[in-house]
Image: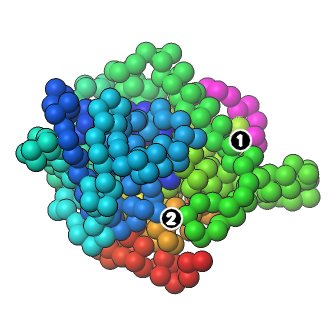
Amino acid sequence: MAISVFDLFSIGIGPSSSHTVGPMRAALTFVDGLGAELSSVSRVQAELFGSLGATGFGHGSDKAVLLGLSGERPEEIDTDTVPVRVAEIRESGRLLLAGTHEIAFDEDTDLTMHRRKSLPAHPNGMVFRAFDASGALLRERTYYSVGGGFVRDESYETDTVFVEDSTPVPYPFRTGADLLGHCASTGLPISEIMLANELSWRTASEVRSGLLDIWAVMAECVRNGCTHEGVLPGGLKVPRRARSLHEKLLAEDGADDPLYAMDWVSLYALAVNEENAAGGRVVTAPTNGAAGIIPAVLHYYQRFIRHSSDDGIVTFLLTAGAIGSILKQTGSISGAEVGCQGEVGSASAMAAAGLTEVLGGTPAQVENAAEIGVEHHLGLTCDPVGGLVQIPCIERNAVGASKAIHAARMAMRGDGSHVVTLDKAIKTMRETGADMSVKYKETARGGLAVNVIEC
C-alpha cells in the first residue's frame, strides 16, 4: 500500500473535494461499471446520506451526481459549461448516461438527499441503482467519499484509512517515525524519499513535469481569482475580495510595512478559495475546502524567498505530499469525519513541511513544522454557513497559510527536537474528531452555521 503525491494533488472542480469531486467520481464509477448493461438501463436512482445530504446542495453534490452520471470527469470537465449542462438536464428531464445512452431523469424522485440519515462506514455515503424498463434492478453500489476526492466502495472499513495500491516502493512509510527512520538510514531528505517512491509509478522527468503542471494550475487559479469580481453564488451574497486586494497591493511597495508579504499570502489564499466557491478549476490540496493554503505558501516562496526555482517547487510538493500521505493513512483529511482540523489543519501542516525543506530544514525540522501545523488546528470545527464553502472557509485558508509560514519559521529556529511528535498530533486530531459532535462536522447544524443569519 502506498500513496502517490498525485493522489493528494489532483486537478478538480469546486467547491468541495468530498462533496463535489467525490460524488462526481462515484457516479462515473457506477456508470462505468454497467458495462454491456448500459444500453438496458431505463432509470437510475441516487441517494446521498449524512454530510452529503445535509450540505450537498450548498456544495454542489446534486450537480456533481448529474455530471458524473453523464460521464464527466472532474479533472477534465470545462467548468464554464457546468451551469448550462445542469440546466439542460433539469429542464428536459433527460440525461445522457455515460454520455451515450439517453434516459429519463426526474431529480425529485431519482436524486434523494437524506439530511439526517447516514450509512455506517462514513458520513459521506452514497447509493446508486440502475433499473431496466421492467423495473428490475441491474446494478446497485454503495460508495463513500472519504475526503480529498478519494472514493471507496462498500468494502470500506471505518477504522482503516488507505489507498488501494499495492505497488511496492523502496521506502514504505505510514507514520512520521517511519519517514524519519528512512531519512536517518539513508541520509536523504524527505523529498528524496518521496521521489524514490514516486519512481515506482513514473520516471523522474514525469514526476517533475507532472508536479510543475499541478503548480501551473494552482498559479492559474490564483490569476483567475485576482481577475474575477462580483458576488459568489449560493445566496449569502459574499463579495469577491481578491481582485480589489490585488489592485491595492500592486499600488503599494510595502517598504514601510514589515508584514506586507503576509498580505500577499492572504491574497493568494483568498483568490483560490473564491474560485473554488464559484465552482472553478482548482487543485485538491489535499481537499478543495483547504485548496488555497499550499498555493498561497508556494507563491510566498516564489515571490519572497531568494533563489526560489522550479526545482524548489517540485521539492516543496514532494515534501508536502509525504506529510499528506501520513495524514491520509493515520489521520483524516475529511471535514465530515473530523471537522476542519482535518482539512485546513492537514493543508497547513503539509505547506509548513514543504516550506521548511526548501528553506534548508533538516528532516527533523520538517517533521517539527508539520507537527506545529497539525497541533495548532486541533479542535477546529467545520461549520459552513448555509452549507456553502464560503464562510468561514475562504478566510480560514488565509489564516491557515499564515500559520504554515509561522510554523516553518519556528521549526527553522530550532534544532528539530520537540515534545509532541507529528504522529501524536495526528492521533490526537483523529481522536478529537471522533469525540466531536456531528453538528460540527460539515452538516451546517452547529457553530457559525446556526449563529449567522443567512441573507
Q: How is the image coloured?
A: rainbow
| The C terminus sits in image quarter | bottom right
Looking at the image, which residue is at 22% across and 66% down? 118
* CB within 8 Å, label 1 to label 2: no
Magenta segment includes 313: yes
Q: What is the x, y in percent for residue 378?
A: 44, 67
Say which of 353 and 264 sits in front.
Answer: 264
- The magenta-colored residue range is 303-315
Element assignment for label 2: loop
> From the viewer's perspective, is residue 75 above or below residue 142?
above
Residue 409 lies, in percent from the top left, at: 64, 53
Q: CA distance from mark 1 to mark 2?
A: 23 Å
Quadrant that contains the N terminus: top left
Give the residue type that dot 1 points to. Answer: Arg
Q: Considering only vertical position in the picture, is 58 above or below 142? A: below
The residue labelled by disc 2 is 388
Q: Tell me what residue is drawn at x 31 percent, y 61 percent.
A: 108
Instruction: Name the spot of residue 146 as percent of width and height, x first.
Output: 31, 52
Instruction: Give the main secondary structure, helix, strand or loop, of the magenta stretch.
Output: helix
Answer with left or right where residue 147 lies relative to residue 114: right
The residue shown at (19%, 58%) is: 121
Q: Is residue 113 in view?
A: yes
Q: Earlier in the sequence, mark 1 or mark 2?
A: 1
Mark 1 burial class by Cα count in 10 Å: few <14, some 14-19, many 20+: some
Residue highlighted by disc 1: 223
> As rendered, which of 204 and 69 lies closer to the eye?
69
Residue kind at label 2, given as amino acid type:
Leu
Q: Quadrant of residue 257?
A: bottom right
